[in-house]
Amino acid sequence: MPRKAPLSTVLTAAEQAALSPEEILQSLKEGNQRFVNNDITARDHTAQVRMAAAGQFPKAMVLSCVDSRVPVEDVFDKGIGDIFVGRVAGNFVNEDLLGSMEFACRVAGAKLILVLGHEYCGAIKAAIDNVKLGNISAMLAKLRPSVTAGGKSFRGPKNSKNPAFVDHVAKLNVMRNVKLITRRSPTLRDMVKAGDLKIVGGYYDLDTAVVEFFD
């Protein structure tokens, strides 16, 4: 397949304003499919860095885990200036990330928030094991409600050595945090009600590179 010509532009304010939340979600789905097929877009990053220096108009905000195996921009075949990315082990929301989302959407114009969990998540495994270690303990406490919910709804061994249970808890954690965003942020909740913002969940399969969307 012939290589695509490098892109020399970044998203503009007018292009951002013209997009709907549904179109942005579709663009993430299509970008992930290109990533899976190893058909990613060639980009002139040097040119894009210079063009984006004066301002940014990203289309989406992704809340991801810190896991190094989840390269968010690559997973969705996006370049400089395309998406905001917030990362924390276990991809959960807190005050700082909610503020970042409000900036990304209410101030900077992004129209989609994606909470992205992933397969084999070490933070989820540690939460299942109720690990106690320094500041990690307080962080894992944010994930424990999903472990508790998973224990009530899962049939089979409920431990971190069971990949099916880890997947189950990780997916529940994604959807729990999707709900927490609008529950804890009146700003974002109002944007959703007005149709200016869509909030969805997703789950990245490390074996296949496919993102399953919960929309």
Image: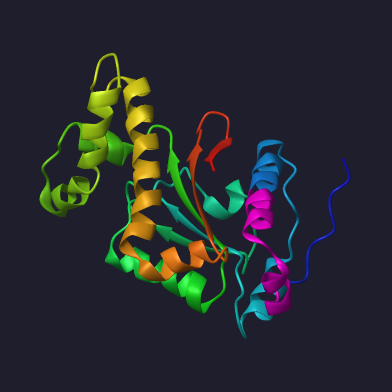
- Apparent side of residue 140 relative to residue 120 in the rendered image (left or right): left
Where's residue 69, x and y in %? Answer: 47, 42
Q: Is residue 118 magenta?
A: no
Q: Quadrant of the C terminus?
A: top right
Where's residue 43, x and y in %? Answer: 73, 61
Q: In the picture shown, does residue 166 fall above or below 110?
A: above
Q: Is residue 21 magenta?
A: yes
Where's residue 14, x and y in %? Answer: 72, 77
Q: In the picture shown, does residue 89 fall above or below 36?
A: below
State the residue at coordinates (25%, 44%): 143
Where's residue 200, x and y in %? Answer: 50, 49
Q: In the picture shown, does residue 27 fall above or below 131?
A: below
- Apparent side of residue 107 relative to residue 167 in the rendered image (left or right): right
The answer to whether residue 23 shows anywhere in this view is: yes
Q: Quadrant of the N terminus?
A: top right
Residue extending farthest bottom: 54
State the residue at coordinates (80%, 61%): 6
State the residue at coordinates (54%, 62%): 197
State the residue at coordinates (50%, 70%): 105
Q: Quadrant of residue 56?
A: bottom right
The boundaries of the magenta stretch are 12-28
Q: How many marks?
A: 0
Comparing 194 with 4, the one in front is 194
